[in-house]
Amino acid sequence: MLRAVAVLCVLGGHLALIMLPGGGPHWRWAVARFGVLLFFVHTSLVLMASLERSFGSPDWVKAFYIRRAFRIYPLALVTLGAVLLGVAGQISRYGVAPVSPQPGVAEIVSNALLIQDLTRHGDIVSVFWTLPIEVQMYAVLPGLFLIARRGLPPFILAAALAVLLGLTIQDLPVPGLWRLNVAAFAPCFMGGVLAYALLLHGARPRLPSWLWPMVILAATGTFILSSSDGSYNPDRGWPMCLALGYVIPFVADLPASLVTRVSAVIAKYSYGIYLLHVPAMWIGFVLAGRAPVIVQWVVFGAAVVLLPWIAYHVVENRGILLGRKIVSGPRAPLAATTPAP
């Protein structure tokens, strides 16, 4: 549910940005931004579990990086290629449009490697701004995994250092310090690491499952209110991300239901929804812009479902399997498990 809510916040915030007139864009950007922060919490928690499964095996850190590379890069590269060929990848309060002007070679290479924040090139695909942050956090997640395994006091110290570093990055006008922009989002990832540390060291569900949707809603609303002045600094989301990470181990799993089944489907295709919802909006509301409004929404709905479905089965899943095969050898299983973010 957390991952499904995350991608729906991004999608809903961007739809509201271009479809609802007046009232200022602040709350719309805030909804989309908090969806990204929820992704960060979920990502770090899931990857802690992934590291635990491979911990102790030879080259477990190398295997982690290989799997992550084949998980995140294939679909990102396909999306980048489509946008360079003219598919819309930019979004603003004025709508969606193809990238303009045409990016140079250095900008294309930076976006392909997902290092555009380090080279200070623009995001050719507007939603690409989050991917370098994830890739850079991958570099430290194995270390955070080892710290979390040592107990809560070492983790608390690491979390405090992450917050201190994040504040430092935002406040010190040091030349070149902008390259450590990832540190400003590190406390958001620490929410997932906190959940893992608590689970590993004895935390057990004590709260009813129906509280979980309410906790997510409360965290989202708090972030929106805290961003009402138009500021989207990452530190506005730190308390909510850490609070979510703290609550996760103490809430019972939701029982199987239509809600959990729908959430599972949305989560499965969430990476494709995240990368391709802007092209889907372009197809529905720009390419089909002269059609009746109801037709535009039907076209958009079809695109936002079909594009991620095709992307998963043609690109994502094949990348997951290839990464696993490289790590595990030719006898790796032929079917992918539920994909991690």
Image (cartoon, helix red, strand yellow):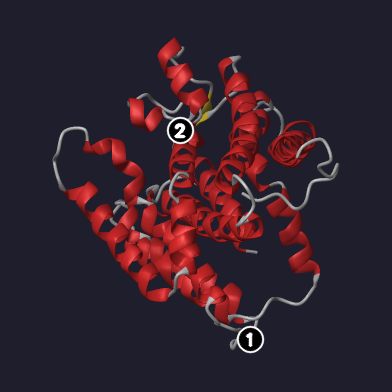
**Residue 130: x and y, percent?**
46, 41
- Image side of residue 285 versus residue 155, left or right: right
Mark 1 to mark 2 CA distance (whole Å): 43 Å
The quarter of the picture where the N terminus appears is: bottom right
Q: Quadrant of residue 212?
A: bottom right
Instruction: Write down the residue under mark 2.
Output: 94
Q: Quadrant of residue 214?
A: bottom right
Q: Residues within 10 Å of mark 2 (few under 14, many from 20)?
A: few
- Amino acid type at circle 2 is Tyr
Of residues 290 and 325, the one drawn nearer to the viewer in this rendering = 325
Q: Quadrant of residue 329?
A: top right
Q: Residue furthest front?
A: 58
**Residue 95: x and y, percent?**
50, 32
- Amino acid type at circle 1 is Pro
Does dot 2 land on a helix, a strand or a loop?
A: loop
- Image side of residue 309 versus residue 137, left or right: right
Q: Residue at x 62, y 27 (%)?
A: 79
Q: Residue at x 59, y 44 (%)?
A: 59
Q: Residue furthest bottom?
A: 206
Does dot 1 land on a helix, a strand or a loop?
A: loop
Vertical position of residue 159 compared to residue 79: above or below: below
Vertical position of residue 115 compared to residue 194: above or below: above
Of residues 275 and 251, the one drawn nearer to the viewer in this rendering = 251
Q: Marks 1 and 2: which is nearer the front?
A: 1
Vertical position of residue 251 compared to residue 159: above or below: below
Q: Earlier in the sequence, mark 1 or mark 2?
A: 2
**Residue 17: x and y, percent?**
48, 44
Q: Is residue 265 visible?
A: yes
Q: Residue at x 82, y 35 (%)?
A: 330
Q: Are marks 1 and 2 in contact (CB under 8 Å)?
A: no
Instruction: Write down the residue under mark 1.
Output: 208
